[in-house]
Amino acid sequence: MVEIKNLTKFYGSHPAVQDISFTVGDREVLGFLGPNGAGKSTTMNMITGCLPSTSGTVLVDGYDIAKDPMEVKRRIGYLPELPPVYPEMRVKEYLTFAAALKGVARGDRRKQVATAMERLNITDVQKRVIGNLSKGYRQRVGFAMALLGNPKFLILDEPTVGLDPKQVMEVRRLIQDLAKDHTVIFSTHILAEVTAVCERVVIINKGQIRAVDTIANLSRSMGGDVTLSLKVEGEMTKATGIIRSVPGVKEITEASYEDGGVRFIISAESEDVRKPLVSKLIAQDCMVLEIAAESSSLEDVFVRLTSPDRTKSREEAFEELGRKLEADRAEELAAQTAPGSGEEDA
Ligand SMILES: Nc1ncnc2c1ncn2[C@@H]1O[C@H](COP(=O)(O)OP(=O)(O)OP(=O)(O)O)[C@@H](O)[C@H]1O
Ligand SMILES: [Mg+2]
């Protein structure tokens, strides 16, 4: 178990992470979701002992990172935002070296390196110089390194950044596979990523936690409906009657004839409505040609939680979030170029 209590980090006078607390249970995959600059990497660097906190504690299986850093580091595999790979080394050579550094017994190194390369699909490039690899491959080498020593906890900072869509799918599948015998905390600013991979999510913005909950609860608590797009064969009036009779269907917002059938846009209480909806239509001889969830209310939740005014509409909130991120970036750039700025751990 990982327990984070009142963790805080100041860079000079800038509070990058403020008083955050949450726990992660064994074999859980926790998504750490927040926009750019939210404090995700800072938090992960503190959890893994790469960065000292200003205050607060991190306990990993009961060991305090400040008091027993070696015990904690032995249990953690970390993929930082910028994997610390040596560009002049070859992939297999580097991983073997990293395995030695991580204390993997000499007799186990070859096997562990081979397994990690296989899991990340980089066996083909094992003899290549890391500096010549594409970004996606370098990312996977860093991920393979995190697996060495078979640590119980994996902390992955934006593991899918820089990967092509096929690799993104592979890495998401890998995370789910690893979760069978690991505890995983991974960060992302992509909402679809958490819904695809994990059950529970911590939403962070401007260094503060906005929500810690299951994805299902978050969607529900915001009272968000889902929009379903449905295409059926046959006649509009009959299908309309059936759709309206399904519990959980709130309203039909659009109905129009489309080649070979009728397209309905439906507002429903949750995606769970899909199953009874399809069963009922089929039972009454209305062939279902297509059904898809158009928008998930979780996106609204994310935007609302990371936007200061929670009553704003989604579009307004998105725009405002974008403006704020830009302003923050500008502020950040100004701070970085100003002499005597708060950079202390660059
Ligand atoms: N070494 C540093 N010195 C000063 N300020 C820093 C330093 N590292 C990060 N910060 C600031 O702390 C805040 C949080 O940064 P952090 O990198 O943790 O965010 P993040 O959520 O990982 O963002 P991203 O999605 O862009 O990776 C930002 O405002 C950032 O500018
Ligand atoms: Mg980051």
Image (cartoon, helix red, strand yellow):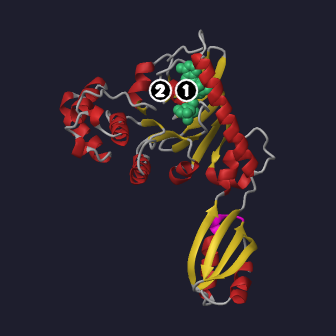
Residue 138 location in percent, x, y?
Answer: 34, 37
Whether the residue carrying mark 1 lies under 8 Å from ligand 1 is answered with yes
Residue 151 location in percent, x, y?
Answer: 38, 34
Q: Tag on residue 42?
A: 1
Q: Which of 121 and 325 is in front in this view?
A: 325
Residue 39 location in percent, x, y?
Answer: 59, 30
Residue located at (47% from left, 40% from top): 184
Would residue 231 appear left or right of 67 to someone viewing this image?
right
User: Please, what secondary structure does the residue beneath circle 1 have?
Assistant: helix
Circle 2 sits on which residue?
48
Q: Neighbour class for label 1 at 10 Å: few (<14), some, many (≥20)?
A: many
Q: In which quarter of the image is ligand 1?
A: top right
- Tell me the kind of residue under disc 2: Thr
- Tell me the kind of residue under disc 1: Thr
Predominant secondary structure in magenta? helix
User: Please, what secondary structure does the residue beneath circle 2 have?
Assistant: loop
Residue range in magenta is 269-273
Disc 2 to disc 1, how far (Cα)? Answer: 10 Å
Residue located at (41% from left, 52% from top): 173
Q: Nearer the viewer, residue 211 or 344?
A: 344
Q: Tag on residue 319?
A: none
Query: Does residue 19 belong to the magenta stretch?
Result: no
Residue located at (46% from left, 37% from top): 156
Q: In this view, does 56 lie above or below 192?
A: above
